[in-house]
Amino acid sequence: MQQTIKIKLTPESISEAIEQIESLQTKQKQLPDVCKKIAERTQQLAQQYFNEAWVNDMGRGERTEVNVTVTVEKTANGYKVVARGKEAVFVEFGAGVHFNGSAGTSPHPKGTELGFTIGDYGKHKGRNDSWRFRDEYGTHSTRGTEAQMPLYRAFMEAKSEVLR
Protein backbone atom coordinates (compact mmCIF):
# COMPACT_ATOMS: atom_id res chain seq x y z
CA MET A 1 0.00 0.00 0.00
CA GLN A 2 1.42 3.33 -1.04
CA GLN A 3 0.07 6.71 0.00
CA THR A 4 1.33 10.24 -0.37
CA ILE A 5 1.23 12.53 2.64
CA LYS A 6 1.72 16.24 1.95
CA ILE A 7 2.82 18.48 4.74
CA LYS A 8 3.73 22.09 5.30
CA LEU A 9 6.54 22.89 7.66
CA THR A 10 4.20 23.99 10.43
CA PRO A 11 3.62 22.28 13.76
CA GLU A 12 -0.05 21.60 12.89
CA SER A 13 0.75 20.08 9.49
CA ILE A 14 3.54 17.93 10.92
CA SER A 15 1.22 16.69 13.70
CA GLU A 16 -1.42 15.84 11.12
CA ALA A 17 1.15 13.94 9.03
CA ILE A 18 2.26 11.98 12.11
CA GLU A 19 -1.40 11.05 12.80
CA GLN A 20 -1.79 9.86 9.21
CA ILE A 21 1.37 7.76 9.46
CA GLU A 22 0.23 6.21 12.74
CA SER A 23 -3.16 5.42 11.20
CA LEU A 24 -1.47 3.73 8.24
CA GLN A 25 0.78 1.73 10.59
CA THR A 26 -2.29 0.55 12.53
CA LYS A 27 -4.02 -0.52 9.30
CA GLN A 28 -0.86 -2.31 8.17
CA LYS A 29 -0.69 -4.23 11.46
CA GLN A 30 -4.35 -5.27 11.02
CA LEU A 31 -3.82 -6.44 7.43
CA PRO A 32 -2.74 -10.04 8.28
CA ASP A 33 -5.92 -10.51 10.34
CA VAL A 34 -8.05 -9.13 7.51
CA CYS A 35 -6.30 -11.38 4.97
CA LYS A 36 -6.86 -14.39 7.22
CA LYS A 37 -10.57 -13.56 7.58
CA ILE A 38 -10.94 -13.22 3.80
CA ALA A 39 -9.16 -16.55 3.26
CA GLU A 40 -11.35 -18.22 5.89
CA ARG A 41 -14.53 -16.83 4.31
CA THR A 42 -13.38 -17.99 0.87
CA GLN A 43 -12.66 -21.43 2.35
CA GLN A 44 -16.14 -21.62 3.93
CA LEU A 45 -17.87 -20.71 0.69
CA ALA A 46 -15.69 -22.99 -1.44
CA GLN A 47 -16.34 -25.94 0.88
CA GLN A 48 -20.08 -25.25 0.70
CA TYR A 49 -19.95 -25.12 -3.11
CA PHE A 50 -17.86 -28.30 -3.35
CA ASN A 51 -20.34 -30.03 -1.01
CA GLU A 52 -23.12 -29.10 -3.47
CA ALA A 53 -21.08 -30.13 -6.54
CA TRP A 54 -21.47 -33.31 -8.58
CA VAL A 55 -19.59 -35.41 -11.08
CA ASN A 56 -21.19 -37.36 -13.92
CA ASP A 57 -20.42 -41.06 -13.62
CA MET A 58 -22.87 -43.19 -15.58
CA GLY A 59 -21.09 -46.36 -14.46
CA ARG A 60 -22.07 -45.83 -10.81
CA GLY A 61 -25.12 -43.57 -11.14
CA GLU A 62 -25.82 -40.47 -13.21
CA ARG A 63 -24.51 -37.91 -10.72
CA THR A 64 -22.42 -38.54 -7.65
CA GLU A 65 -21.20 -36.24 -4.91
CA VAL A 66 -17.60 -35.18 -4.78
CA ASN A 67 -15.15 -35.67 -1.95
CA VAL A 68 -13.13 -32.44 -1.77
CA THR A 69 -11.74 -30.80 1.35
CA VAL A 70 -10.94 -27.08 1.34
CA THR A 71 -8.42 -25.65 3.79
CA VAL A 72 -6.61 -22.38 4.54
CA GLU A 73 -2.83 -22.50 4.74
CA LYS A 74 -0.45 -19.78 5.88
CA THR A 75 2.22 -18.77 3.38
CA ALA A 76 5.24 -16.48 3.62
CA ASN A 77 3.16 -13.61 2.19
CA GLY A 78 -0.27 -14.33 3.66
CA TYR A 79 -2.72 -17.19 3.18
CA LYS A 80 -3.88 -19.53 0.45
CA VAL A 81 -7.06 -21.53 0.02
CA VAL A 82 -6.44 -25.12 -1.11
CA ALA A 83 -8.93 -27.69 -2.46
CA ARG A 84 -7.86 -31.35 -2.17
CA GLY A 85 -9.63 -34.29 -3.74
CA LYS A 86 -9.48 -36.28 -6.96
CA GLU A 87 -12.50 -34.46 -8.42
CA ALA A 88 -11.42 -30.91 -7.46
CA VAL A 89 -9.98 -29.88 -10.83
CA PHE A 90 -12.79 -31.53 -12.82
CA VAL A 91 -15.47 -29.78 -10.75
CA GLU A 92 -13.66 -26.43 -10.90
CA PHE A 93 -12.86 -26.37 -14.63
CA GLY A 94 -15.20 -29.01 -16.09
CA ALA A 95 -14.50 -32.06 -18.22
CA GLY A 96 -15.98 -32.94 -21.59
CA VAL A 97 -17.83 -31.04 -24.28
CA HIS A 98 -21.28 -32.35 -23.32
CA PHE A 99 -21.63 -29.89 -20.40
CA ASN A 100 -18.99 -27.29 -21.22
CA GLY A 101 -18.98 -26.23 -24.86
CA SER A 102 -16.44 -26.63 -27.59
CA ALA A 103 -13.20 -28.56 -27.24
CA GLY A 104 -10.22 -26.31 -26.61
CA THR A 105 -12.30 -23.64 -24.84
CA SER A 106 -13.18 -23.22 -21.19
CA PRO A 107 -16.36 -22.03 -19.46
CA HIS A 108 -14.18 -21.02 -16.48
CA PRO A 109 -13.00 -17.36 -16.60
CA LYS A 110 -9.43 -18.48 -15.81
CA GLY A 111 -9.52 -21.87 -17.58
CA THR A 112 -7.74 -20.97 -20.81
CA GLU A 113 -5.20 -18.77 -19.00
CA LEU A 114 -4.33 -21.63 -16.62
CA GLY A 115 -4.28 -24.31 -19.33
CA PHE A 116 -7.47 -26.12 -18.29
CA THR A 117 -9.37 -26.34 -21.55
CA ILE A 118 -12.13 -28.78 -22.42
CA GLY A 119 -11.01 -32.02 -24.06
CA ASP A 120 -7.27 -31.42 -23.67
CA TYR A 121 -6.72 -33.52 -20.52
CA GLY A 122 -5.35 -37.05 -20.67
CA LYS A 123 -6.13 -38.88 -23.88
CA HIS A 124 -8.37 -36.08 -25.21
CA LYS A 125 -11.50 -38.24 -24.90
CA GLY A 126 -13.37 -35.26 -23.45
CA ARG A 127 -13.64 -33.96 -27.02
CA ASN A 128 -16.32 -36.65 -27.52
CA ASP A 129 -19.85 -36.29 -26.17
CA SER A 130 -19.29 -39.41 -24.02
CA TRP A 131 -16.40 -41.78 -23.42
CA ARG A 132 -15.29 -44.73 -21.32
CA PHE A 133 -12.56 -44.84 -18.71
CA ARG A 134 -11.13 -47.40 -16.33
CA ASP A 135 -10.23 -46.93 -12.67
CA GLU A 136 -9.80 -49.09 -9.57
CA TYR A 137 -13.57 -49.77 -9.56
CA GLY A 138 -13.82 -50.97 -13.17
CA THR A 139 -14.78 -49.49 -16.52
CA HIS A 140 -17.22 -46.58 -16.65
CA SER A 141 -18.97 -44.45 -19.21
CA THR A 142 -19.24 -40.71 -18.70
CA ARG A 143 -20.22 -37.45 -20.37
CA GLY A 144 -17.84 -35.50 -18.19
CA THR A 145 -18.61 -32.91 -15.56
CA GLU A 146 -19.97 -29.39 -15.75
CA ALA A 147 -17.58 -26.63 -14.67
CA GLN A 148 -19.11 -25.64 -11.34
CA MET A 149 -16.25 -23.34 -10.28
CA PRO A 150 -16.54 -23.59 -6.48
CA LEU A 151 -13.22 -21.85 -5.81
CA TYR A 152 -13.75 -19.10 -8.35
CA ARG A 153 -17.32 -18.45 -7.16
CA ALA A 154 -16.18 -18.43 -3.52
CA PHE A 155 -13.37 -15.98 -4.28
CA MET A 156 -15.68 -13.66 -6.21
CA GLU A 157 -18.30 -13.73 -3.45
CA ALA A 158 -15.74 -13.10 -0.68
CA LYS A 159 -14.26 -10.27 -2.76
CA SER A 160 -17.72 -8.75 -3.19
CA GLU A 161 -18.33 -8.96 0.56
CA VAL A 162 -15.05 -7.18 1.28
CA LEU A 163 -15.79 -4.41 -1.21
CA ARG A 164 -19.22 -3.70 0.38
Image (cartoon, rainbow, N blue to C red):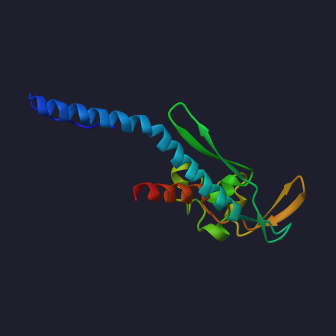
Q: Residue at x 63, y 57 (%)?
A: 92
- Left or right placement of residue 53 versus residue 80 in this view: right
Question: In this orientation, does residue 18 appear?
Answer: yes
At which x and y percent is residue 109?
51, 58
From the viewer's side, name the closer residue of 85 and 145.
85
Quarter of the rendering containing residue 46: bottom right
Quarter of the rendering containing residue 150: bottom right
- Give the number of callouts: 0
From the viewer's side, name the closer residue of 40 and 108.
40
Q: Residue at x 35, y 33 (%)?
A: 25
From the viewer's side, name the closer residue of 11 and 82.
11
- Left or right placement of residue 15 versus residue 155 in this view: left
Quarter of the rendering containing residue 10: top left
From the viewer's side, name the closer residue of 89 and 45.
45
- Left or right placement of residue 43 versus residue 128 in this view: left
At which x and y percent is residue 85?
73, 50
Please state, as top left, top right, bottom left or bottom right, where the C terminus lies in the image: bottom left
- Left or right placement of residue 129 versus residue 32 in this view: right
Q: Where 63 falls versus 36 (above or below)?
A: below
At which x and y percent is residue 8?
9, 31
Q: Where 156 falls versus 24 (above or below)?
A: below
Question: In this orientation, does residue 117 appear?
Answer: no
At which x and y percent is residue 4?
22, 36
Q: Residue at x 60, y 60 (%)?
A: 149
